[in-house]
Image (tube, rainbow, N blue to C red):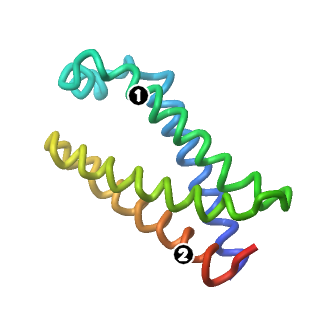
Amino acid sequence: MNTLLWALQVILAVKFGSVAYSHGLRTDQAKMQQGIQRLGAVARPLLTLIALCTFLGGVGLILPGATGILTWLTPLSAAILALMMLLSVGFHLRCRESPNLVPGFVILALATFLAYGRWVIVPF
């Protein structure tokens, strides 16, 4: 089970790293322009905040367990990232962006399982 949780940590860290990149540095993409226009002036700071939080959350999934320092941060990071994904699914649902819902639910489920797994099943 520990190996499965580590694999999940790495997969989610890579995924949230790519989310941080796309939301923080690639905001000029055509598919993001519609959402940015919908949000108006708050879009750029919000996307920067999302990018920063997802990057730090992704680091929090790997670094504490790899170093053995502050290992309680790993399940906390997973829980916070799950909450962020829940908010993301709600946002995309409200904006009627249904193609973003399925991956959002999958990542939400994986992050929730990881948080539970590292808090209860196989804590560090």
The answer to whether residue 12 is above or below residue 56 is below
Residue at 77%, 61% (x, y): give it.
Answer: 65
x, y percent for residue 6? 70, 67
Identity of the residue drawn at 49% across and 53% down: 81
x and y percentages locating residue 68 in the rendered image: 84, 61
Please tell me the numbered disc located at residue 37: none
Depicted 78 relative to depicted 28: above or below: below
- Residue 78's x, y, as percent? 55, 60
Cβ–Cβ below 8 Å for labels 1 and 2? no
Residue 71 position by quadrant: bottom right
Q: Please name whichever residue, 71 or 15, is drawn nearer the observer in this view of the structure.
A: 71
Around disc 2, counting alpha carbons within 10 Å, would you say few (fewer than 14), some (14 to 19), or many (20 or more)? Answer: some
Please state, as top left, top right, bottom left or bottom right, where the C terminus lies in the image. bottom right
| Residue 74 quadrant | bottom right
Check disc 2 and report its element: helix, strand or loop: helix
28 shown above or below 116: above
Report the number of numbered marks: 2
Task: Look at label 2 and name its amino acid.
Answer: Tyr
Q: Residue at x 33, y 47 (%)?
A: 88
Amino acid type, callout 1: Leu
The residue under label 2 is 116
Mark 1 vs mark 2, CA separation in Å: 28 Å
Q: Is residue 84 left or right of residue 53?
A: left
Q: Regarding mark 1 in the picture, which secondary structure is present there?
A: helix
Which residue bears the numbered disc 1?
47
User: Which mark sits nearer the N-terminus, 1 or 2?
Assistant: 1
Image spot of residue 95 (x, y percent): 16, 40
